Image (cartoon, rainbow, N blue to C red):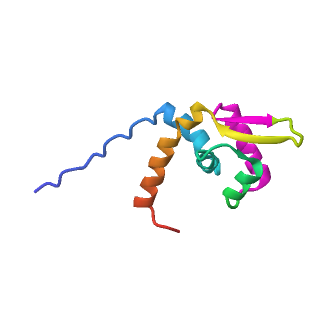
Amino acid sequence: MRAESHVPEPCVRADAALTRAFTLLGKRWTALVLGSLSAGPAGFRELSRAIEGVSDSMLSDRLSELTAYGLVERMVDPGPPVAVTYALTPRGQALIPALEQVSAWAREHLPDS
C-alpha cells in the first residue's frame, strides 16, 4: 500500500492594505493611544497616566505619527494657560470598532500574561 504524499497548500500573498495597516498599528503603543482616545479628547498627561509604561518621548512620537496619518487631531487652546488636547478624527474613530474586535478576540483566545 502506497502512502499518499501531502502537498501543502501555497501561502496566500499578504494583502497590501493589511500590510500598510499593521505597519502603523503594529507599532508598540499605537493601539493603546487610539483606544485611550476613544473615550474622548485628552491632554498629554492624561494619556501618559492612562497608558502605563509609555515614556513621554514615545507617547509624543506616537501622537505625532498618528496626527500625520490623520487619525488624531492636536488642538491648541492659547489660554492662558496654553492647553493642548488630542482627539480622534473621523478616520481614527473609524478604527475603534476594529480595535474593539481585536480586544474581544484577545480576551477569548490569548491567555493573560
Number of residue marks: 0
The range drawn in magenta is 54-76
Q: Residue at x 17, y 55 (%)?
A: 3
* Above or below, 10 relative to 110: above
Q: Residue at x 73, y 49 (%)?
A: 59
Residue 37 horizontal side relative to residue 10, left or right: right
Q: Residue at x 42, y 54 (%)?
A: 105
Instruction: Provide residue 104's location: percent of width, then percent of height.
Output: 44, 54
Name, please, the residue furthest toward the bottom.
Answer: 113
Residue 83 horizontal side relative to residue 66, left or right: right
Judge whether residue 59 is colored magenta.
Answer: yes
* Above or below, 53 relative to 32: below
- Where does the N terminus fall, quadrant-wise? bottom left
- Front in this rendered view, residue 93 or 78: 78
Judge whether residue 50 is colored magenta.
Answer: no
Name, please, the residue furthest toward the front.
Answer: 80
Q: Residue at x 62, y 50 (%)?
A: 36
Name, please, the residue furthest toward the left.
Answer: 1
Instruction: Provide residue 53's location: percent of width, then percent of height.
Output: 70, 61
- Front in this rendered view, residue 112 or 84: 84
